[in-house]
Image (cartoon, grey):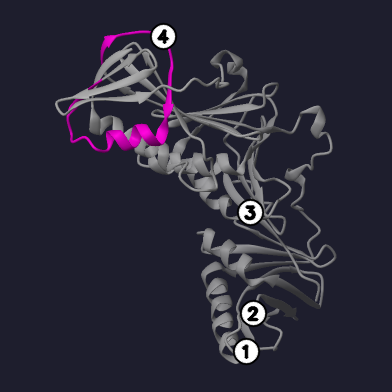
Amino acid sequence: MHFFIYSSTLLNKLYFLNEINKKKLYFKNIYFILEINKKKLIITSFSNTEDYSIHVYTDIYIYVKENTREKVIIDSKLFTEILSTFTKEIISIKKDNDTLNISSLQGSFKIPILRKKLNLIRGDLFCNNNTIFIFSNLLLKILEKIIFSIGNVKFKTILNGVYFQFSPYESYFISTNNLVLVKYTVKYIKSNKNIKFIVPRNSIYILHKILKYEKNSNNNVYIKYNSKENYVIFLSKNYIFSSKILNIDNKKNKKQQNYNSIIPTKKFDVLLIINRVLFLNTIKRLLILSKLLENKKIEKFIYLQIINNEFSIFNRKNFSLKIKCKSIYNSLQKIKMGFNCKFLIEILSHLDNDFIYFELYNSNKIGVLKTNFYKNKKEMEFISILIMSIIV
């Protein structure tokens, strides 16, 4: 292996590969795998634990002096730090026994090559029958709408990631933190058969970063998965990202919840149309005012009450604000439900519709916010968000 490349071009690629793994949330041991394929240098960022294995591939055009099929494994941090000391210049990189020699006008520097057995994903494990494609900007939009409810590392959720389901009719993307469940439906993304799997939380955060990095180019992202090996690959124009998945169809996971059916579609007690911004600002205003009255302690919960089609929001001190809305259906003369303020604000902030539908289920003690009424079949994309009510 021997090739020439601009140091700044290589460094920009390495910076991004390091960036997506830099938080403690991800992995401590990151390796770079270098290999030459014709006139390209293939760089693989490899991370794995007992539960997760993540690969990010990218490539760069190089001038090849000597081409070999061998793969070189090096420490990602050391390689990046060495390259960051070079100015914008052409450098030579050559494998020599157990070292990788970096040469420039400033001299020659040696980096040790690591001897590790890494279980990389083989491309032949993925067949075209298990391939779905989606525009990168659409996938980014979906993740940004649902990622807030994915939970965190300290708080274990029933999903611990994002649930993907593709069918011949439509597709669903679902996340939950156990108290809020977000379902994004896209009717025009279809598969010739039912495919469903869970992409782990850490992998979703990395995929989100990759898509944000390429958000100005609306390219196709091809999703390939292998149910037997429990792996999924996301292929974009500049990057290939792969991760382990939790396969719902696996025999060990027969008791998995049918996440698609959690959000009810009918038999609500109350259905309202509310101005989203007005609703959001009213909750924020109530929190500010209640903070003044309660010795600067922020009230965690608010209560919604509907009496004879009059909608009011109040806290435990009965500090109340009224809000205008349109009642489409109301089977109860009076209903009172309580919700977490933080969750409601997060939900309303992540939506961008002017008006939203708010369904209240008194017997189940849940609320469902939707961007589309379930009888409206013209909408091709819409969001449904379930939020648990507190006992009042």
Q: Is residue 177 left or right of residue 379?
A: right
Residue 384 versus residue 358 in the image, above or below:
above
Q: Residues under labels 1 and 3: Cα distance?
A: 29 Å
Label 3 vs 4, first from the N-terminus: 4
**Quadrant showing the N terminus:** top left
Q: Residues under labels 4 and 2: Cα distance?
A: 62 Å
Residue named by callout 3: 151
Q: Residues within 10 Å of mark 4 (few under 14, many from 20)?
A: few
Q: Pointer 1 and pointer 4: residues touching (CB < 8 Å)?
A: no
Residue 16 versus residue 362 in the image, above or below:
above
Q: Residues within 10 Å of mark 1 (few under 14, many from 20)?
A: few
Label 2 vs 1, first from the N-terminus: 1
Who is closer to the viewer here, 149 or 94?
Answer: 94
Label 4 vs 2, first from the N-terminus: 4
Assess whether residue 88 is covered by the magenta stretch. yes
Residue named by callout 1: 294
**Front of the two marks 1 and 4:** 4
Residue sitting at x 58%, y 17%: 128
Residue named by callout 4: 69
